[in-house]
Image (cartoon, rainbow, N blue to C red):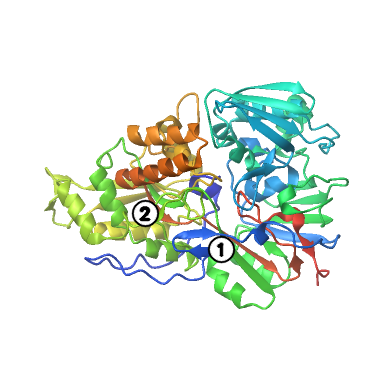
């Protein structure tokens, strides 16, 4: 996400850029969008052609693919992390029970078919036979049971997979290739989340006998196996002989085309770009937006820009239990007083689509009706603060009420998606409203601890990617607040009975028309209550050499599906 806090632990890069554009007394004039997605834009909705998700022709076998990415996940146990790299890495080493199709519907993978009980609590999976893990273990119903237990085992310390299957109660092996999952309550996103890479199948033998070894010596059923790994430097994957169970949607048959993938962790954005430009790498899974124009101009390179489903990037998360953000009028004023176009340019250099609402534009049940409720509007922001009683001003121009200055401390960590330049830009925008924003930059570990403890007023940065609109529940339902029993993602400790009711009802329903109504009302409620400040879509930017062929994308994550890649010519 999945996601996830601070862009899934993105590596920090300091951009020395100007602050947001000056405020005016009227809503900002919209800036023409630069090419920001290779999807199909239909009004406010975004989709992608079906051909982006399946092979058009078989590829050529052989060769070594040289890949760069910004950060190391630190572990290959996909059940135990929420790192964004799992979105593509999970498809290299692991397989899932199901896969989304080109339209976002659930389709077969390791599960050939399934039935759902009338009450929505029992799922019976009929599993594919002949699938094995790279240690020779069979994939069967017992393997599924062991994997689901591993995801929710407290020892796994899962911040993501466990949350996605939280309603799972127990599993039963009906026979070797029939597995039955029983949920405590109806949970309509269950099949969709099982399609995500964080819920891939790990060897049951490894889980039971050597769970700690998964971190650096993973055993999956996927199309590649890990040959070597050096922390913070790189990893080498080799093609797995005999693999023949790719998701049918991809139209890939048999083994992967590549002999070998050499992955390098390269935090420096400029080095990722120059190595690609010089032909020293073939693909970067984290293309630097500041180099997007140069990549597009090159006759040797291709840039692809995709939008992740789920929740857009948020620049601020309010702690609604602490003043002044316990007042929705202050939250609304701050949201409307921030120039999102300016933030998007600081981070995305014109590549990111600005957002003022709460679901990505390619997410099922996204309703653009409320997209402008929190749009940049300095006049409305000032009026909201006046209404909240912050009408006086001190000598420095900051608003006061009963002798108290209006302000808060922003807690953040330096990252590529939330640099100190972004913090300073927000600070400058809010100062124009008479709001004093103090900035406290700390290491990620300290920020994370304070987030889970609720020890902050407002926090900077973050996204949560998921392949369903249930991402709203994950981030904003009161059950998602961190407790002794669960690591929750509702970091702002937001509680709203009406939103809880809508999101819980959506989880219980399988009726498309009802889900559309429920999620529309939930998005309206979010715009009214303003638990966070959404800023821009969560983009996937990848760039590659034109000698690379077979580029298709994963249906859940919109990342490159590496097993389908092949090389048209040998490296120079």
Please report the residue visible at 43 percent of the width from the left and 66 percent of the height from the top.
345
Against 554, residue 296 (above or below) is: below
Where residue 43 sits, quadrant-wise, is bottom left
SS state under label 2: helix
Identify which residue, 212 or 35, lies in the foreground: 35
Quarter containing the N terminus: top right
Against 320, residue 561 (above or below) is: below
Quarter containing the C terminus: bottom right
SS state under label 1: loop
Please name the residue that numbered disc 1 is placed on: 39
Residue 329 location in percent, x, y? 23, 46
Against 354, residue 142 (above or below) is: above
Does 112 sit left or right of 345 as displayed? right
Residue 257 location in percent, x, y? 82, 57
Q: Decide: marks 2, 1 in contact (CB < 8 A)? A: no
Residue 490 visible (yes or no): yes
Q: Farthest right residue?
A: 241
Going from N to C along the chain, the mark reached first, 2 or 1, is 1
Q: Nearer the viewer, mark 2 or mark 1?
A: 2
Label 1 crowd (10 A; few <14 / some 14-19 / many >=20): some
Label 2 crowd (10 A; few <14 / some 14-19 / many >=20): few
Does 427 sit left or right of 183 as displayed? left
Residue 100 location in percent, x, y? 64, 46
Q: How many marks?
A: 2
Rounded to the nearest angstrom, the CA distance separating label 2 from label 1 is 21 Å
Residue 432 visible (yes or no): no
Please report the residue visible at 68 percent of the width from the left and 48 percent of the height from the top.
89
Residue 361 location in percent, x, y? 48, 55
Please name the residue that numbered disc 2 is placed on: 369
Per the rendering, the mark at residue 534 is: none
Against 243, residue 179 (above or below) is: above
């Amino acid at each position: 996400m999945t996601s996830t806090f601070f862009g899934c632990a993105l590596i920090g890069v300091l951009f020395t850029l100007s602050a947001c554009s000056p405020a005016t007394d009227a809503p900002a004039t919209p800036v023409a969008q630069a090419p920001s997605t290779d999807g199909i834009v239909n009004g406010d909705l975004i989709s992608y052609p079906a051909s982006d998700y399946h092979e058009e022709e078989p590829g050529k076998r052989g060769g070594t693919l040289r890949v760069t990415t910004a950060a190391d996940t630190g572990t290959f146990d996909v059940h135990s992390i929420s790192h964004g790299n799992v979105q593509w890495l999970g498809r290299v080493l692991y397989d899932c029970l199901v896969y989304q199709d080109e339209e976002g519907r659930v389709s077969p993978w390791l599960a050939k078919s399934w039935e759902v009980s009338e009450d929505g609590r029992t799922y019976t999976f009929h599993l594919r036979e002949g699938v094995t893990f790279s240690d020779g273990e069979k994939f069967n119903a017992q393997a599924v049971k062991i994997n689901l237990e591993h995801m929710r085992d407290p020892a796994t310390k899962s911040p993501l997979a466990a949350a996605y299957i939280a309603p799972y109660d127990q599993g039963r092996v009906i026979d070797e290739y029939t597995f039955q999952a029983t949920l405590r309550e109806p949970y309509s996103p269950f099949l969709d989340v099982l399609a995500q890479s964080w819920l891939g199948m790990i060897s049951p033998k490894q889980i039971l006998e050597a769970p700690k070894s998964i971190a650096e010596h993973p055993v999956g059923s996927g199309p590649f196996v890990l040959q070597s790994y050096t922390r913070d430097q790189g990893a080498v994957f080799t093609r797995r002989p005999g693999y023949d169970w790719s998701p049918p949607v991809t139209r890939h048959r048999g083994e992967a085309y590549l002999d070998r993938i050499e992955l390098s962790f390269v935090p420096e954005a400029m080095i990722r770009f120059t190595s690609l430009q010089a032909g020293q790498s073939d693909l970067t899974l984290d293309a630097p937006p500041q180099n997007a124009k140069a990549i597009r101009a090159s006759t040797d390179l291709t840039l692809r820009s995709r939008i992740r489903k789920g929740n857009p990037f948020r620049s601020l998360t309010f702690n609604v239990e602490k003043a002044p953000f316990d007042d929705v009028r202050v939250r609304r004023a701050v949201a409307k007083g921030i120039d999102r176009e300016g933030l998007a340019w600081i981070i995305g250099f014109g590549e990111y689509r600005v957002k003022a609402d709460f679901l990505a534009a390619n997410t099922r049940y996204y309703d653009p009706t409320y997209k402008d409720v929190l749009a940049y509007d300095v006049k409305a922001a000032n009026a909201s603060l006046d209404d909240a009683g912050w009408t006086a001003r001190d000598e420095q121009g900051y608003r006061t009420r009963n002798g108290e200055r209006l302000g808060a401390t922003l807690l953040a960590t330096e990252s590529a998606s939330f640099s100190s330049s972004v913090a300073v830009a927000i600070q400058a925008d809010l100062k124009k409203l008479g709001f004093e924003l103090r900035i406290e930059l700390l290491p990620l570990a300290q920020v994370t601890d304070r987030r889970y403890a609720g020890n902050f007023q407002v926090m900077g940065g973050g996204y949560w990617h998921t392949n369903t609109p249930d991402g709203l529940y994950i981030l904003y339902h009161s059950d998602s607040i961190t407790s002794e029993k669960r690591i929750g993602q509702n970091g702002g400790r937001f509680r709203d009975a009406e939103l809880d009711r809508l999101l819980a009802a959506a989880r219980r329903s399988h009726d498309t028309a009802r889900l559309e109504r429920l999620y529309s009302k939930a998005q309206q409620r979010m715009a009214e209550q303003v638990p966070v400040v959404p800023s821009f879509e969560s983009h996937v930017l990848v760039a590659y050499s034109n000698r690379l062929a077979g580029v298709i994308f994963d249906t859940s994550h919109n990342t490159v599906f590496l097993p389908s890649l092949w090389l048209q010519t040998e490296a120079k």
